[in-house]
Image: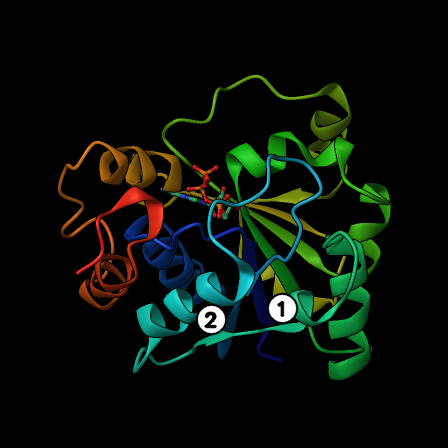
Amino acid sequence: MSPLALFGGTFDPIHVGHLRAAIEAREALAADEIRLLPCALPPHREQPEVGAEQRLRMLKAAIAGQPGLRADERELRRSGPSYTYDTLVSVRAEIGESRPLVLVLGADAFAGLPDWHRWRELIAQAHLAVLTRPDAHGLIDPRLEELLATVGTADPADLRRTPCGRLLRLQIPPLPLSSTLVRERLRRGRSVRFLVPDAVLAMIESQGWYGVSGC
Ligand code: ATP
């Protein structure tokens, strides 16, 4: 059965590193659909510079017309911190017990997993697919090493055999790009052309977000 993939983030703003990662993951997993979920209140980091509805608008503009990529607004419609565990439980209730569900995350996000709410229970709801990211350091928590040793796989086909419970490491072409870098460049009046989709850049410029002087 084709998996449903989920890719959460702050997307402050969405950039081509996110979009390439989503496309690479969808293709590798042979997933019909990958849903991008902007978080309302990220529990483990400073608060986003731009509001949730604005980040959602940029995300929707970025994926418009891209087959298999969809925005999922559920974390924005919930109150309180955007815990991934709650999101997985809610998506699992929507798709039923048998369809494979895959939570896709970059290596930097994976490295912080033991700080997440109910992190050990995530794989009872979904598989995890961890994408290589150029700026992520190699050291990982021994608890994650243990998880890799017990449920790790390098074969995406393993994630189609069961609804949840495996941990896939996926190599993708590296794009050393982050929202932090995009925000910094905007703040300094530098160009971010081709780092974010044109439609996103147009929105940032017209609204004057991230310290850009609006037009
Ligand atoms: P910031 O710089 O504000 O921390 P970010 O660029 O890391 O933002 P997030 O919205 O925090 O973006 O990330 C959402 C998800 O996308 C995370 O799982 C993250 O690891 C992944 N991700 C972001 N950029 C890349 C990239 N260039 N390559 C692979 N994965 C990425």
Which residue is at the front of the view, 214 or 15? Answer: 214
Q: Looking at this view, is 106 or 74 the one in front?
A: 74
Of the numbered discs 2 and 1, the one sitting upstream in the chain is 2
How many residues crowd around disc 1 within 10 Å: few (fewer than 14), some, or many (20 or more)? many
Distance from mark 2 CB to nearest ligand 1 atom below 8 Å: no
Kindly identify the residue that appears in the image at 70 percent across and 36 percent down. Answer: 113
Residues at marks 2 and 1 touching, judged by CB atoms closer than 8 Å: yes
- Circle 1 SS class: helix
Amino acid type of the residue that numbered disc 1 sits on in the rendered structure: Arg
Using the rendered view, name the quadrant where residue 141 is placed: top right
Q: Which residue position is annotated with label 1?
A: 160
Residue at disc 2, secondary structure: loop
The three-letter code of the residue at mark 2 reads Ala
Q: Position of residue 9 (x, y in %)?
A: 54, 52
Residue at the image point whose x is 16% and y is 37% from the top: 189
Who is closer to the viewer here, 64 or 29? 64
Q: Which mark is residue 30?
A: 2
Q: Residue at x 81, y 61 (%)?
A: 86
